[in-house]
Image (cartoon, rainbow, N blue to C red):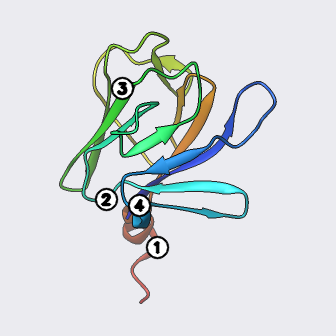
Amino acid sequence: MAYLEITRSGTMGLIPTVATAASDHSHQRGGVERANLDGGPASVGRHVHNLIVLNDQDVSRHHCIIDQEGSAFTLRDLESHNGTRVNGAILEEPTRLHDGDIITVGQTVMKFIDRSVWKRVIGDRT
């Protein structure tokens, strides 16, 4: 299971308004919005046709996309006006995401969580 934790938006540290195409793709827990990425691709932007819709004027209508191939997730910028950052570096080409990576689009900050990594490290105890 992989998801994004959307923790703040704008200079005042506000949680952004997030809508998703399907109600089971997003939920809020402890003040953090979570968006499920399994079954990708997951498009991110201001336009309502994105899977993850962000209410952030610095985010392009179609900002970036997270593709899934098997258990790997890759982030691509869609020629957005303000760019996409991963761990502070501007994304210049598609980049594989790793558990804990910080993605910044506009004023919105998201953390990539990949629980499949956790299962491989500590073992599946279910």
Badge 4 is on which residue? 25
Which of the two labelled residues, at mark 2 and mark 1, occupies the earlier sequence position? 2
Looking at the rendered image, the quarter that the N terminus falls into is bottom left
Badge 2 is on which residue? 38
Which of the two labelled residues, at mark 2 and mark 4, occupies the earlier sequence position? 4
Q: Please tell me the numbered disc located at residue 62.
A: 3
Looking at the rendered image, the quarter that the C terminus falls into is bottom left
Q: For the residues labelled 2 and 1, say whether their Cβ atoms are less than 8 Å apart.
A: no
Residue 88, given in percent of the width and then of the height, sits at 56, 22
How far apart are labels 3 and 2 at the CA level?
20 Å
Occupied quadrant, residue 118: bottom left
Badge 1 is on which residue? 122
Residue 58, given in percent of the width and then of the height, sits at 57, 18
How far apart are labels 3 and 4 at the CA level?
18 Å
Residue type of the residue flagged with mark 3? His
Residue type of the residue flagged with mark 4? His
